Image: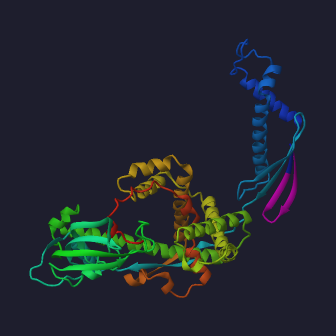
């Protein structure tokens, strides 16, 4: 094999490779000899087919296999011999080959740059710590009591108010004609629940049991049933009864109903849940601080192909959101050229951080273990109650999806490694300070803020079995998204 380097500019490398005809012929003969005992032709015993006839029948297919294997094998050898790590799959172009002649092909590849990581011991990070009081636990217990409560007829007559349950009969009409799904009897509607279309529940607030009224509403333009979308409707409503909600007693019985041994055990479980939640938020904030510091303290040439791929992924998800009517205000109305200019810096930041973290992980032999994989699989499966096994099977049968799931795990392990080396200072904050939205914190640059809002490429790659569709509600109960 003859190798000539034809380009060495920045991270771009190109090579011309010539494989002698004699070597190609040697491989073809060896391959034909390998298959001769497996081939069956009428009139010939296995292994006794003449070489000339074997070549006539199978020479072309064998030649194709040999050429593909030769190109792959020699491409790998060129990269290894030159100590090159491709950033993306090398581009291969066969420039010359005639049977009986030399094989010539070109290799074009962008390589991963040399990356010198900073001394992580010089980093100082802030870890926000919350001193949890019982106010949040009390709020949660009150919500649980309300959710587990019962309804009972009013102790004394009064008008309905938000939070009450009204028992109603209703009949919906459009232009005086009843429509399908717009009728129900003895329907229990909680006022303020938002389960009916906008304006319906508000008109039933402040009524008495026994009242008959006409509720006038307009179906949303984006309503699920096309025949009702955007239309004015009237509902003949009879208020048959008003009930008030009574919260459940906060006691051991409630706790056992929720799977806890006692009321104290329930409170402890809630307290631990909050602790884990706040710890997770604190970790994410410290991770963002770390990534900002890493981006600020590292600069190296980036493979153009990786930046272009990342940028394409970002803009692709913006387009998908646009088509689904879910686009962020800050990108609405912008052309692809404008989006490209705006998000290129973000794509570059992601590629820089991705390469840096990968290099730190490689040099320090950080790996995702099978135990790590099992944990993330279980966590993902738990998001789909009743379909856990299906989710696990989905990932086991889809290596690309599983790899996308493992990516964040690897990143977190590298981040944890860096945090262990850095100086971490604990800062006690209130719950409100910890959970304060980012835009309320000290003015970040617009580009930096956009980077956090830009769609993540890995999210687009990750797919899981869909949850079961919810049962359809009557038309009057549907709510616009």
Position of residue 242 measured from the top left corner of the image (x, y, whole percent):
16, 77
Query: Which quarter of the rendering shows the C terminus?
Result: bottom left
Position of residue 149 measured from the top left corner of the image (x, y, whole percent):
18, 71
Observer-nearest of 323 and 295: 323
Quadrant in the rendering for residue 279: bottom left
Observer-nearest of 175 and 81: 175
Position of residue 418 measured from the top left corner of the image (x, y, whole percent):
56, 69
Residue drawn at 52 percent across, 71 percent down: 325
The residue stretch that appears in magenta: 2-15
Furthest-front residue in view? 176
Res. 122 visible in picture: no
User: Is 329 part of what is drawn in magenta?
Assistant: no
Observer-nearest of 123 and 399: 399
Residue drawn at 24 percent across, 71 percent down: 170
Observer-nearest of 53 and 349: 53
Magenta portion: prevailing SS class:
strand
Describe residue 43's horizontal placement relative to residue 471 as left or right.
right
Res. 417 visible in picture: yes
Query: Which quarter of the rendering shows the N terminus?
Result: top right
Residue drawn at 58 percent across, 77 percent down: 123
Furthest-left residue in view? 155
Residue drawn at 40 percent across, 69 percent down: 228
Describe residue 40's horizontal placement relative to residue 412 as left or right.
right
Furthest-bottom residue in view? 442
Quadrant in the rendering for residue 156: bottom left
Describe residue 211's horizontal placement relative to residue 131 as left or right.
left
Q: How many marks?
A: 0
């Amino acid at each position: 094999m003859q190798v000539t380097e034809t380009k060495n500019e920045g991270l771009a490398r190109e090579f011309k490779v010539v494989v002698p005809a004699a070597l190609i012929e040697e491989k073809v003969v060896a391959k034909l000899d390998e298959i001769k005992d497996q081939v069956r032709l009428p009139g010939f015993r296995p292994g006794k087919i003449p070489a000339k006839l074997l070549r006539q029948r199978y020479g072309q297919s064998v030649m194709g296999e040999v050429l593909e294997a030769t190109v792959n094998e020699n491409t790998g050898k060129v990269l290894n011999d030159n100590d090159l790590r491709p950033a993306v799959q090398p581009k291969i172009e066969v420039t010359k080959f005639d049977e009986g002649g030399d094989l010539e092909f070109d290799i074009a590849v962008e390589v991963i740059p040399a990356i010198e990581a900073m001394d992580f011991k010089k980093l100082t990070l802030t870890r926000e710590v919350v001193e949890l009081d019982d106010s949040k636990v009390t709020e949660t217990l009150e919500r649980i009591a309300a959710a587990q409560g019962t309804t009972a007829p009013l102790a004394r007559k009064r008008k309905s108010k938000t939070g009450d349950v009204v028992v109603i009969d209703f009949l919906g009409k459009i232009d005086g004609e009843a429509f399908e799904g717009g009728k129900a009897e003895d329907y229990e509607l909680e006022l303020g629940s938002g389960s009916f279309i906008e304006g319906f529940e508000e008109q039933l607030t402040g009524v008495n049991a026994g009242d008959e009224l006409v509720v006038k509403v307009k179906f949303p333009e984006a309503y699920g049933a096309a025949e009702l979308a955007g239309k004015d409707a009237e509902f003949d409503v009879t208020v048959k009864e008003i009930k008030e909600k009574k919260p459940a007693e906060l006691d051991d019985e409630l706790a056992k109903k929720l799977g806890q041994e006692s009321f104290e055990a329930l409170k402890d479980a809630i307290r631990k849940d909050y602790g884990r939640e706040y710890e997770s938020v604190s970790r994410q904030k410290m991770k963002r601080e770390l990534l900002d510091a890493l981006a600020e303290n590292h600069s190296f040439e980036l493979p153009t192909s990786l930046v272009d791929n990342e940028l394409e992924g970002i803009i692709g998800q913006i387009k998908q959101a646009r088509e689904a009517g879910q686009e962020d205000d800050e990108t609405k109305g912008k052309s692809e050229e404008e989006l490209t200019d705006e998000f290129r810096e973000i794509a570059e930041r992601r590629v820089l951080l991705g390469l840096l973290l990968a290099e730190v992980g490689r040099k320090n032999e950080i790996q995702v273990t099978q135990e790590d994989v099992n944990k993330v699989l279980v966590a993902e499966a738990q998001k789909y109650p009743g379909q856990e096994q299906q989710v696990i099977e989905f990932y086991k049968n889809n290596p690309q999806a599983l790899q996308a799931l493992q990516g964040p795990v690897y990143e977190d392990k590298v981040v944890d490694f860096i945090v262990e080396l850095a100086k971490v200072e604990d800062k006690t904050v209130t719950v409100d300070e910890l959970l304060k939205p980012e835009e309320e914190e000290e003015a970040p640059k617009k580009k930096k803020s956009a980077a956090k809002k830009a769609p993540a490429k890995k999210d687009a790659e990750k797919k899981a079995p869909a949850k079961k569709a919810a049962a359809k509600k009557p038309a009057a109960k549907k709510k616009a998204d």
